Image (cartoon, coloured by chain):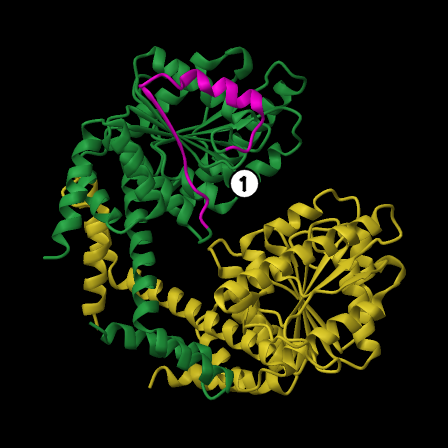
Chain colours: A yellow, B green
């Protein structure tokens, strides 16, 4: 009985979110980010209204001009009549307070536009917490009726890479002369990228950056195709597809294997933004309409459910076995028990609890 | 019955490791790092012979001179008659092949010394795998009778920080003029550091680096003491101790709260190494003899058992529920089930399996 009250409250808030009430969206985002009691009920209520938004990840190293580019994408999407939600998980982002005044001023452009909703995600201490919060907050914006949700994050850590995996389409922003392009790709960005933007393309070295990327993509694709031929399937950007067809697909059908296009742009002057958005939209069509794209969406849902299970298991086990964990550690400390056997016994004990 | 054969083999290998047979130590390290079948039996057999070695973590940003300093510490420890095992988890380390020829030549100094054993840890793709491998490999060297085990790692990522938590004493190596000192401290190194070395102290800016560190430590300690006063206990480097005593402790007793000392050195010339080693040994005495130090060891064992349980749980659940996970993901994809409820149901299902 007592759990019905929060569930009913969650239902009421969810209804207001789905109706697009701005205050309720803000409240729901805060509740989900802070994981206040009842936030899971809220997410359960909202889930049926999700699945309509196009989620676009924007990532790249500091200095590549991500936030300026995000700003331009918001403009272009607004001009096309789309409602845009933005989540920032970049500690150096203007939205989260890490950046210079000029950035802040620039962003206020959207402050009075009801079709744009910008929110930052708190950085959490625990592993994986950031990506889970980001994913759940994306769901809130999705349910609230935003057509596009942009998730901006620095592409450096494991946690940030995880976040891009919650997106349908991930844009990796590079800039010439940062000297870390190749390193960035090594760090896992190549697997993550659906579209590359070479920003600040009016600078020296932009063409070299494009060529480096083309080479990396060609080598990566070659390795992927080779691996696929060996193993009977192709793994690319988290997608497992069947072996490549012998004959090329008809020219008007989306390709089975997505090769990330590269677009040059100068975000500060708004140059190349339309072409970049077209490339992203082509990827969206690929994800939405091809079997490979559908498979990728399914694979990510499997991953989400698996991760959820993982976190829930750990929470359940550590709270159910608090005393047993302490006792086991004491026995290990006294060397009357080894930690490996201790783990096995705790697992058995956990499964015996109801 | 069938499990008795690997267990007996593990027992025989363990006995040879404990007897100090070099080939067997190398074999055991490889088995543990690769997690070959039966490696857990080996670790179980070895565990009773562990707990004697002093485990020292050496970490710091690239360019701080970690490997040169590690080399000097090996020399100093050998001169004191100690057997030294070294684990390298630094991809740029000379042992693991990332560094320049000069480094390699320098390290060959120990090649013919039976009292020194140097091994690298493979970088694993999965989260937490590196720190688990490192911890288990430390156990092998401990059981083999090495008095000191040095664990050298780059102090940049979460995984690397985890590794330093397996050490009794952690040395953080800084160098003047790298421009990333403060950033390094922000990234969690302050909580990790038991002793700071300001290497390359003959360079400009060494005193400034020392002052910066002193300030950071003072601020950190202040914040720690303030937090402790508020919450009734002091958390420091993973240690939870009771509220600070009102009267200062007698001068000859180890302090209840460890404040990381800072030592300047020039590793290339061997200057300051004795003083640095003394500071590390003082920390070892603190960890070994004070209640706060014992509590820290216990806290880390609890953490290890908890982490082991976590990994085992996940492995057990994902293999027991492979089909159910796929079905749940399909239902979520069809939006007939939300992922949060799916997780709860899977948890219940897992606990029902035997």
A327 left or right of B135?
left
Give residue B214's position: percent from left, percent from top.
55, 26
Q: Which residue is drawn at 31% across and 47% down?
A: B304
Q: Residue at x 44, y 15 (%)?
A: B109
- Classed neighbour count for the residue bearing mark 1: other residues with Cα under 10 Å, few (<14), some (14–19), many (≥20): some
Q: Is residue B73 above or below residue B297?
A: above
Subunit that carries the residue with mark 1 = B
Residue to which mark 1 is pinned: B156
Q: Looking at this view, name the residue that lies furthest to the left.
A: B1
Give residue B106's position: percent from left, percent from top.
50, 18
Which image quarter is the C terminus of chain B in? bottom left
- Classify mark 1: helix, strand or loop: loop
Q: In which quarter of the image is residue A83?
A: bottom right
B171 left or right of B15?
right
Q: Can residue B236 be seen in this view?
A: no
**Residue B110 is one of the magenta-drawn residues:** yes
Which image quarter is the N terminus of chain B in? bottom left
Give residue A320's position: percent from left, percent from top.
25, 64
Q: In this view, does A41 lie above or below A36?
A: below
B296 left or right of B156?
left
Per the rendered image, the range of residues in magenta is: B97-124
Q: Residue at x 29, y 65 (%)?
A: B316
**Residue B114 is one of the magenta-drawn residues:** yes
């Amino acid at each position: 009985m007592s759990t019905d009250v929060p569930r009913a409250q969650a239902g009421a808030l969810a209804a207001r979110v789905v109706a697009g009430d701005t205050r309720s969206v803000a409240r729901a985002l805060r509740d989900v980010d802070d994981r206040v009691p009842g936030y899971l009920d809220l997410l359960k209520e909202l889930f049926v209204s999700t699945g309509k938004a196009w989620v676009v990840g924007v990532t790249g190293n500091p200095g590549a001009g991500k936030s300026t580019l995000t700003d331009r994408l918001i403009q272009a999407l607004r001009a096309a009549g789309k409602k845009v939600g933005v989540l920032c998980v970049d500690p150096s982002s203007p939205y989260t307070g890490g950046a210079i005044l000029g950035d802040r001023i620039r962003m206020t452009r959207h402050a009075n536009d009801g079709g744009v909703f910008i929110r930052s995600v708190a950085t959490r201490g625990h592993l994986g917490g950031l990506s889970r919060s980001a994913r759940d907050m994306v769901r809130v914006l999705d349910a609230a009726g935003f057509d596009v949700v942009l998730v901006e994050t620095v592409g450096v850590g494991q946690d940030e890479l995880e976040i891009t995996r919650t997106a349908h389409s991930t844009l990796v922003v590079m800039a010439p002369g940062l000297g870390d392009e190749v390193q960035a790709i090594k760090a896992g960005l190549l697997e993550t990228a659906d579209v590359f933007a070479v920003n600040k393309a009016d600078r020296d070295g932009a063409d070299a950056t494009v060529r480096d990327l083309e080479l990396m993509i060609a080598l990566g694709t070659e390795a992927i195709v080779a691996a696929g031929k060996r193993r009977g399937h192709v793994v690319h950007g988290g997608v497992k597809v069947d072996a490549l067809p012998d004959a090329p697909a008809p020219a008007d059908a989306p390709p089975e294997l997505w090769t990330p296009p590269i677009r040059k742009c100068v975000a500060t002057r708004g140059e190349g933004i339309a072409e970049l958005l077209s490339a992203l939209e082509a990827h969206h069509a690929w994800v939405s309409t091809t079997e490979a794209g559908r498979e990728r969406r399914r694979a990510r849902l499997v991953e989400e459910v698996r991760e959820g299970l993982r976190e829930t298991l750990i929470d359940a086990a550590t709270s159910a076995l608090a005393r047993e964990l302490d006792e086991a550690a004491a026995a290990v400390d006294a060397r009357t028990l080894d930690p490996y056997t201790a783990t096995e016994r705790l697992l058995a004990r956990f499964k015996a609890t109801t």
